[in-house]
Each structure stands twice: as C-alpha cells, then as structure tokens.
Amino acid sequence: MAKYELVFKRSVYKDLRPIAKADVTRILKRIDALADDPRGPSCEKLSDQERYRVRQGIYRIVYEIQDKQLIVTVVRIGHRGSVYNQ
C-alpha cells in the first residue's frame, strides 16, 4: 500500500498550542501513523461529513482522505468535548 502525504490546515497549529507538550508528541505520532493506514481499525467516519476521526487519549484528530492524490488532510485537533463544535 502506498504511503499517504500528510497535510495540515493552518488552524491545526493553533489547536495544538494549549495542549501539553507530552500530549502533542503522542498526537503527532498518531498522525504520522495515518500516513500508512488512514482507515485503520480505530478510525471512525463522521456521519454528517466526509471526514474521519481517531482518538488519542482525551483528544480527537479530525481529518479528510483524498484517495486519488494519496493525501490525508488534518482538519482539526481538540478535546473530545469541543472538537466537533465549529
């Protein structure tokens, strides 16, 4: 299977600012794993959108997959209670 390219929206960097450094490290490792398998066993498709999410502790990583271009775009990272509110 080909490796996907990881792309981050600019707002993701702002999402990471208030998160503790140790948690950010774990989140980035989890995102790196998406390049190999973006639809792994722990990913879930969001029902009202063409987006997916994975859990990393109390945080959620929301992303989109473009299969034709082999791109995973990380859209949002946040606490499980507030990540879906936009």
Image (cartoon, rainbow, N blue to C red):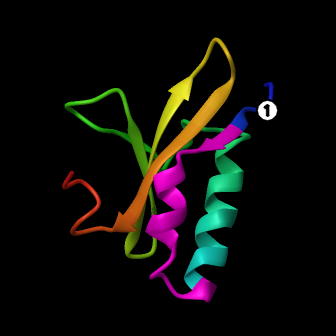
| Along the viewing direction, whichever of 40 and 21 lies nearer the viewer | 21
**Residue corresponding to mark 1:** 3
- Residue at the image position 53 percent from the left and 88 percent from the top: 20
Single out the residue that lies furthest toward the top: 68
Against 52, is 62 above or below?
below
Side (left or right) of 10 relative to 79: right
x%, y% of residue 47? 22, 33
Regarding residue 13, the answer to whether it shows in the image is yes
Single out the residue that lies furthest toward the right: 2
SS for callout 1? loop
Where, by quadrant of the figure, is residue 26 drawn?
bottom right
Density class for disc 1 (Cα within 10 Å; few <14, some 14-19, many ≥20) is some
Quarter containing the N terminus: top right
- Residue at the image position 53 percent from the left and 45 percent from the top: 9
Residue 10 on the magenta segment: yes
Q: Tally the marks.
A: 1
Three-letter code, disc 1: Lys
x%, y% of residue 70? 69, 23
- Residue at the image position 51 percent from the left and 71 percent from the top: 16
Residue extent of the magenta highlight? 6-22
Regarding residue 61, the answer to whether it shows in the image is no
Where, by quadrant of the figure, is residue 44 drawn?
top left
Against 78, is 38 above or below?
above
x%, y% of residue 21? 61, 86
- Residue at the image position 58 percent from the left and 68 percent from the top: 27
x%, y% of residue 60? 40, 61
Where, by quadrant of the figure, is residue 61 drawn?
bottom left
Residue 56 on the magenta segment: no
